[in-house]
């Protein structure tokens, strides 16, 4: 539960998502404060992506509630949640490969207004949207590739493009799903700088991350999931020294 006076953008309360007998997420509660970077971490199969899928409307929760800015959003369709201000990247990047990098971002600008790609695509291509989309590409460092087909981008640049597309939704809350996965050490450093810059601009970020160095460095607080349940929550230092967390990641010692 939240403390009085905290400015919370997201509240997840006793959320569960079961698939038959599998409790992918089981009775999980946490909150995200406006302007912070909160990390959702845990071993493989802990329930992190399922958690994201419920928050962003891919799945309805089996039980529990999700609030964005005080309004309940669990069970709404994904495009409605996006229109209310939840932007999301995916672990597996899926750009519109036949489109230019610039047009991929312009589709993002159209989605909140038109609800779907099919509706937005004939309407988004105007000079105002092109200018806005170029500003997002500039922010993520892809302005030089605006007219290139998205299909030729490297993984690092694809992740930047996906970030630009998510920012184009004008999100109150940005969900980053494994945005550092598969990147070289140099690209990880650049992406960390980019995420910090986005936070400094006033965005609130909830991220899933396997790279513990990244999570510990970027996040002010961490929520640790294991086997669908919440194992721990706290600052990076608190989580790092929590014996339950060490055991979940490394297994029981002698």
Image: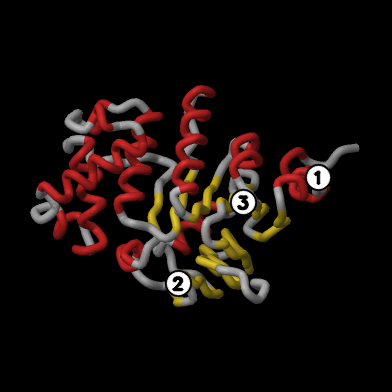
- Label located before the other in sequence (1 or 3): 3
- Of the two numbered discs 1 and 3 in the rendering, the one whose residue sits closer to the viewer: 1
The answer to whether 70 appears left or right of 244 in the picture is: left
Residue at disc 1, secondary structure: loop
**Where does the C terminus fall, quadrant-wise?**
top right
Q: Earlier in the sequence, mark 1 or mark 2?
A: 2
Residue labelled with disc 3: 46
Residue to which mark 1 is pinned:
241
In the rendering, which numbered label is found on residue 138? none
Q: Is residue 83 left or right of residue 237?
A: left
Image coords of residue 76 (percent x, y): 37, 72
Query: Which is more N-terminal, label 3 or label 2?
Result: 3
Q: Is residue 162 visible?
A: yes
Where does the image place residue 38, in percent across and percent down from the top left?
Answer: 58, 53
At label 1, counting other C-alpha atoms closer than 10 Å, the crowd grade (few under 14, some 14-19, many 20 or more) is few
Seen from the viewer's position, the closer of residues 196 and 232 is: 196
Q: Residues within 10 Å of mark 3 (few under 14, many from 20)?
A: many
Number of labels in the image equals 3
Badge 2 is on which residue? 74
Q: Position of residue 71 (x, y in %)?
A: 45, 77
Residue at figure coordinates x 57%, y 62% from the top left: 33
Mark nearer the viewer, 1 or 2: 1
Residue 172: image location, x then y, percent: 42, 60
> How far apart in space, not on screen, are marks 2 and 3 (Cα)?
21 Å
């Amino acid at each position: 539960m939240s403390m009085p006076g905290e400015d919370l953008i997201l509240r997840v309360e006793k959320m569960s998502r079961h698939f038959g007998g599998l409790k992918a997420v089981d009775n999980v509660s946490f909150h995200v404060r406006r302007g912070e970077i909160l990390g959702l971490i845990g071993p493989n199969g802990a329930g992190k992506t399922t958690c994201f899928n419920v928050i962003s409307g891919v799945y309805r929760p089996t039980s529990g509630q999700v609030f964005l800015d005080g309004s309940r959003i669990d069970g709404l369709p994904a495009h409605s949640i996006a229109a209310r201000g939840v932007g999301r990247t995916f672990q597996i990047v899926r750009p519109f490969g036949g489109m230019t990098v610039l047009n991929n971002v312009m589709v993002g600008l159209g989605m909140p207004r038109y609800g779907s790609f099919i509706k937005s695509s004939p309407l988004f291509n105007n000079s105002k949207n092109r200018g806005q989309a170029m500003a997002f590409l500039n922010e993520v460092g892809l302005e030089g590739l605006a007219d290139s087909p998205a299909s030729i981008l490297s993984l690092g640049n694809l992740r930047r493009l996906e970030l630009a597309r998510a920012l184009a939704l004008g999100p109150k809350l940005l969900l980053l799903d494994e945005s550092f996965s598969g990147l070289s050490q140099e690209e990880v450093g650049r992406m960390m700088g980019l995420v910090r810059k986005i936070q400094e601009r006033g965005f609130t970020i909830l991220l899933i991350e396997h790279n513990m160095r990244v999570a510990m460095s970027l996040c002010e607080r961490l929520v640790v999931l294991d086997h669908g349940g919440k194992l721990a929550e706290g600052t990076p230092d608190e989580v790092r020294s929590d014996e339950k967390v060490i055991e979940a990641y490394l297994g029981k010692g002698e």
